[in-house]
Image (spheres, rainbow, N blue to C red):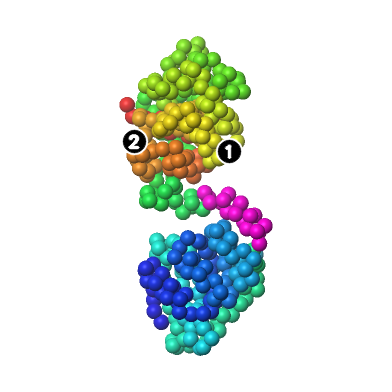
Amino acid sequence: MKLITTATELEKEFRRLTKEYDLFFWATAWASSGSKLFNDLLTNKEKIQKIVVGIHFYQTHPDFIEAFLNNKKVRFIQQPEGTFHPKLYLFTDKTKKWELIIGSANFTTEAFSRNTEASLLITHKDSNSADTYQNALKLVDQTFSDGKTFNKTDLDKYRTTWKNHRQKIKSLSGQYGSKKRKPKPIHEVPMMSRSWDEFMNEVRNDPTHGLDRRLRVIEIAQELFESANHFNELTEDQRKFIAGIPNELDIKGAEDWGYFGSMKGAGIFKNKIKENDTNVSKALDQIPLSGQITKRHYDNFIKYFTQTFTGNYIATATRLLCMKRPDTFVCFDSKNRSALCKDFGIIQSEMDYERYWDDIVERVYDSDWWQNPNPKNNTEGKVSEARAAFLDSLYYEE
């Protein structure tokens, strides 16, 4: 018997057993593809006798399932009560030799590379080995009978649900964006744990711009969007106001057009707004005025926006987004980015369109003040409808 506590040693032993033994009896809560061990399993597919894999919480990768479609020796299980949670790997042959790995490690890439796991390697030479072998085999047999072989229809349904649950799982794991950037745990990110009352206190204490004047800017922008079916139907001054560039819009409060991100120094952007660029209008058409904003909405916006603006125009893009959906987007510009990134626990450098969604919007969605607004009067109600945009008032620095 041996205790295995490192990913390197676990992978080494697993690969040895896969090569050395002829018969596999496994039961694991989750599995993924793409690892050396997964490739070893495919190479030794004929050795599989019974493998049972759980699909609770949609943690098992659909690519793993696809590799074993219609395979009668590999079944997938989601028991109706409780959670299918074993991690048991029995290797044996036609003699009385066998070895068993049992512990915390699922058959996933993370378990054999990044995770902290602990597993026992038990062999036929250990004490009480006969009972251990029979009990392990019994568990695999029982759960195998409760599982099902997946076909193409099963896989397609599972993959759709798996995709829809990915961000929920990542959020709960504290994973935003690339794994190369080690994120802080959620509870250590100050902005994500702020309550609605704490958030409102900071909004009211904005030392630079008045709350009422900020709300008026949001109100004007929303009225303009609601007055036309498309951005390119607005007048030049109306478009300029929304874009955060100097204009002559004759409306009370329009003089504060620079609140929530002044773009007066963005020359190319200013020219395209003046020219009434078609792609800018098409980009904004992708963002609905109400309802949940999804990554698909955002990606479609970026697709059209970047047809006109090549390179990194994150400030101008997010100014437009912020004006159309201030509940979801904050303008990310030179005046707020340093303090915002620090409070959100993210890296400021190389911010791009993909990272803006991953590192900022997803954190906004998961923040307590965003998920649980509790306005106590009309003013707070208006702020709640533009609460992401008001991050600018918290982080604005002259």
Q: Is residue 128 above or below residue 273?
A: below
Q: Is residue 36 above or below residue 329?
A: below
Residue underneath mark 1: 292
The answer to the question of whether label 1 and label 2 lie on touching residues, with beta carbons closer than 8 A, is no
Q: Is residue 293 above or below residue 398?
A: below
Point out the stretch of residues depicted in magenta: 151-168
Q: Is residue 352 magenta?
A: no
Residue type at numbered disc 2:
Ser
Measuring 44% from the left and 88% from the top, which residue is drawn there?
125
Q: Secondary structure at mark 1?
A: loop
Q: Tell me the quadrant of the picture where the C terminus can be found.
A: top left
Measuring 64% from the left and 66% from the top, which residue is drawn there?
70
Q: Nearer the viewer, residue 250 or 235?
A: 235
The tally of labels here is: 2
Q: Secondary structure at mark 2?
A: helix
* Coordinates of residue 65 in the picture (x, y in percent): 58, 62
Measuring 39% from the left and 21% from the top, which residue is drawn there?
267
Residue underneath mark 2: 338
